Structures are given as structure tokens and as C-alpha cells.
Image: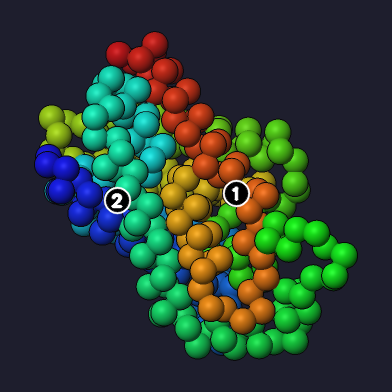
Amino acid sequence: MSSSDIFIGETIGTALLTLLGGGVCAAVTLKSSKARNAGWLAITFGWGFAVLIAAYVSAPLSGAHLNPAVTVGLAVKTGEWGDTPVYFAGQLLGAMLGAVIMWVTYYGQFRAHLADPEHIRDAKLGPEDPHPHDVAGPVLGIFSTGPEIRNVVQNLATEIIGTAVLVLAILTQGLQDGGKGLGVIGVLITSFVVVGIGLSLGGPTGYAINPVRDLGPRIVHALLPLPNKGGSDWGYSWIPVVGPLVGAVLAGGLYNIAFA
């Protein structure tokens, strides 16, 4: 695979991932959405199908990493780090593009939701708050993750564990396969792994398990002209970046010890 193929494939694939994954969060959350209040099961399966579609489309070009944690885990497994920056660049750009397209799709619903007096009240911070950007706004959860209980050690451990499960499941499929990318069965397995992680381990933090899936849309949330959107919770933002990368390294190391 050439660097241009990798960059284009990861950009397209990760854009589809955050468009469809963020889209199910928007559908379940926003006022005037037909799927509002569909619940956690809809979110977990929505993200699973997002992985399925994004990986299937992008696999011929880039191997469908779509996640810096997957890229790092594969690099630890193989010792090949040369294309890592290209993967990272495509993934971050794609994650941001997908979040923007999701916002365009639900533009009317965002406006209706954020015009609700209850959400306006939630978005407004008291003058005594010294860190307004560290507070999660009322629609931030559509773009990025956040913990139910703020505990740095627990939140970080949750992201490490969830990502280690994901990456180990991918590594044991042998997804490199001579650089040809994912087969259809591998895509299906990975999609169901993501659903399983969401159902079993997603409760504490919303299971980012992917640094750019959280960081890219969080940047978009901070930049978009959303009235009454509140803060982007930058104080938490490092956890869904660092945790998945640590989990990926651990999974890669475990693979090399136990399976190589």
C-alpha cells in the first residue's frame, strides 16, 4: 500500500465511522429525532454497524485501521512503524470530517435541541466557574465520550481495558494478511467485538477505545457555531487518547508473548 492509499483510505473510512457512529448518538439524543430515546442498545449496535461499513469500504485502500490504537497494536506486533504517521493523519482528518457531516445531517435537530430552555440552562455556567471549556455541554456526548463518575484512575483503566480487548481480538485475526487488508469475516468479527465492548465495558466512560473517534469530533464540537453548546470538556480529553494507546501497546505485547 502506498502512503497516498493509506491516507485516503483512512480518511474515508474514519469519516464514515464518526459519521455513522456519531449519527446514532445524535439520533438517540436530539429533540425532533425519530429515534430519540432509543437507548444504549441502539447506540452499541449503531457503532458496531459503523465499524462494519467503514472497514468494509476502506479495507482495499488502507487495511481499515480507522483507529490509532489499532495502528499502534499492529506496529507493536510487526515492528513496522514507518507508515504510522500517515495512518494517524488520515484517521484524525477523517474523524473530524465525519463529525462535520453528521452535524450537517442533524442541523435542524441540533438547533431545536439547543433552543430548548432546559438545555440553554444546562449550557450556561455561573460566573464563578474558572474553567468554562472543561465543562461538558449538553450535546458534547454526541461528538465525544465522557465518564458517568469522574475518577481519573478508573476512567483511564476502563479505556485501557476496553481497547486492549479490541486490539487483541483484531491481532489474533491476523488482519495484516500480507497487506491485503481485512476480509469480510474479519470485518464482521471486529464489528461484533465493538458491540460486545460497548455492552459490557461501555457504561463507565462511553467506550472511546479510539483516540481520534473522541479527539476529532471533540475539536469539531469546539469549533462549530452551535448556540448554547457549552464546553468541550478538555480536562477529560486526554483520557480517551492516552488510555486507548496504552491498551494497544499492552495488547500488542501480550500478542507477542502469547501468540507469536
Residue farthest along the right direction in this orientation: 128
- Mark 2: which amino acid? Gly
- What amino acid type is highlighted by mark number 1? Ser
Q: Decide which of tag 2 and tag 1 comes sooner along the chain.
A: 2
SS label for mark 1: loop
Specify few, some or many for label 1: CA neighbours under 10 Å numbering under 14, 14-19, or 20 or more.
some
Up-down: is 258 above or below 4?
above
Q: Nearer the viewer, residue 50 or 218?
A: 218
Front-lying residue, 25 or 220: 220
Q: Nearer the viewer, residue 110 or 235?
A: 235
**Camera-nearest residue between 159 and 81:** 81
Residue at 61% over, 70% down: 139
Label 2: which secondary element: helix
Q: In the rendered image, which residue does mark 1 sit on?
A: 237
Q: Residue at x 69, y 87 (%)?
A: 116
Q: Badge 2 is on which residue?
A: 90
Residue at the image position 47 percent from the left and 34 percent from the top: 245
Horizontal and vertical percent position of residue 107: 47, 83
